[in-house]
């Protein structure tokens, strides 16, 4: 499953991906800007089945600077993960732009997607209310969750949501294949 | 007067579907493997059973005839395949593939794609099918038929 990460710079895309892929062993305090795209692979098992989903996570740069090169790597993703920083209003309003860009690459296919509000540990500085983000996500057909990579809260949740939705799509498709003959 | 005994053509050369496991053909590689929908389903002679892809494209499978065959027509039944490339190899091992044909298929809502390729007769020991892109996250391949001759002598 090819999963594309998008979101503004410094919202925590790399932190979230690294934390998830290293099973919580890894929190970078110092910010290093991602240049281009980094690929990480992780297998997630799907509850109540014997199946698992292998996630190829494309952690991409939030800086516009690199976006032309990224467009190529974003081709035909299977799932979307859009991340914003709950203390940064701008990073939330830019989600619409990221979503539009990713969807333009999907050739009209239905894609499972999740919107992630990160940095919930910074309680006093919250700028985007959960309810507002949830509502927007619902309108866009995305699932929603909030995380704090720093406090290791919910870091696996967005990935499990995506893996489960992708598996669900597969099962539906197999039903269709059966019905063809 | 002299007589020549001519074996009937059908006894000497058999025109048949070569892509059947019952003929000794095998699928030796497939890039996706859901045990419930294995690649062997492509060559079991039934279009009811199928192989599914389970991830990113491109996806491919390789058919091994275990002998040199002459093929004049290829047919594939599949669903949601957008761009397909077929390659052949005459080697003993699955290497040195050369392009046979490449095609963009039509989207067929709710019905199998049946694609026939009538090609100038060619020899092969292996065929490789590369699904370069698709109309959805997953595709199914139901059958591949290769019409041609096996020299029985
Ligand atoms: N307080 C807090 N800080 C976080 C959290 N997640 C990430 N950070 C910090 O935010 C900064 C940026 O994180 P990155 O993961 O590098 O951001 P990014 O989205 O990958 O940025 P680009 O690569 O430039 O697109 C780092 O200094 C992290 O330590 C969190 O949950 N809480
Ligand atoms: Mg980064």
Image: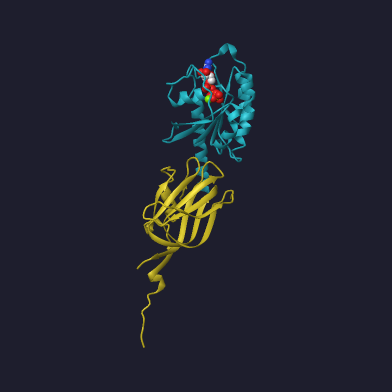
Chain colours: A cyan, B yellow
In percent of width and height, residue A78 lies at: 53, 36
Nearer to us in this view, B123 or B2 = B123
* Residue projecting furthest to the top: A124
Instruction: Locate the N terminus of chain B by quadrant.
Output: bottom left
In percent of width and height, residue B23 lies at: 38, 59
Q: Residue at x 60, y 24 (%)?
A: A134
Task: Name above or below for residue B104 compared with residue A42.
Answer: below
Determine whether, in the image, residue B92 is placed left or right of residue A116. Answer: left
* Residue projecting furthest to the bottom: B1
Instruction: Locate the C terminus of chain B by quadrant.
Output: bottom left
Task: Name above or below for residue A33 compared with residue B130.
Answer: above
Q: Quadrant of residue A104?
A: top right
Q: Residue at x 46, y 35 (%)?
A: A53
Q: Residue at x 57, y 49 (%)?
A: B110
In percent of width and height, residue A176 lies at: 53, 45
Nearer to us in this view, B122 or A47 = B122
Residue A113 appears in the rendering: yes
Residue A181 appears in the rendering: no
In percent of width and height, residue A157 lies at: 50, 25
Counting every numbered tag in the picture gives 0
Q: Quadrant of residue A87?
A: top right
Q: Quadrant of residue A47?
A: top left
């Amino acid at each position: 499953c090819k999963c594309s990460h998008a979101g503004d710079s410094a919202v925590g895309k790399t932190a979230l991906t690294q934390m998830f892929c290293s099973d919580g062993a890894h929190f970078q305090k110092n910010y290093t800007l991602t240049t281009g795209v980094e690929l990480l692979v992780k297998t997630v098992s799907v509850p109540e089945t014997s199946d698992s989903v292998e996630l190829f996570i494309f952690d991409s740069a939030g800086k516009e600077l690199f976006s032309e090169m990224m467009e190529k790597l974003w081709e035909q993703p299977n799932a979307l993960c859009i991340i914003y920083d709950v203390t940064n209003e701008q990073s939330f309003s830019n989600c619409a732009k990221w979503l539009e860009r990713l969807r333009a690459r999907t050739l009209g296919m239905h894609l499972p997607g999740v919107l992630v509000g990160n940095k919930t540990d910074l309680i006093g500085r919250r700028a985007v209310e959960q309810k507002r983000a949830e509502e927007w996500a619902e309108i866009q057909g995305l699932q929603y969750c909030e995380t704090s990579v720093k406090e290791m809260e919910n870091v696996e949740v967005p990935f499990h949501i995506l893996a489960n939705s992708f598996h669900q799509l597969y099962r539906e498709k197999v039903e269709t294949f059966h019905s063809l003959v | 007067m002299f007589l020549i005994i001519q074996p009937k053509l059908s006894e000497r050369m058999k025109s048949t579907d070569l892509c059947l496991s019952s003929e000794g053909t095998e699928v030796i590689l497939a890039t996706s493997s859901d045990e419930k929908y294995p690649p062997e389903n492509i060559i079991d002679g039934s279009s009811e059973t199928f192989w599914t892809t389970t991830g990113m494209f491109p996806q491919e499978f390789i058919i091994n005839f275990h002998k040199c065959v002459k093929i004049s027509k290829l047919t594939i039944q599949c669903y949601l395949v957008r761009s397909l490339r077929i390659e052949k190899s005459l080697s003993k091992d699955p290497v040195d593939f050369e392009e046979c044909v490449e095609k963009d298929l039509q989207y067929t809502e709710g019905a199998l794609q049946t694609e026939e390729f009538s090609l100038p007769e060619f020899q092969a020991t292996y065929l490789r099918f590369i699904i370069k892109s698709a109309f959805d996250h997953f595709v199914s391949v139901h059958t591949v038929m290769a019409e041609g001759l096996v020299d029985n002598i």
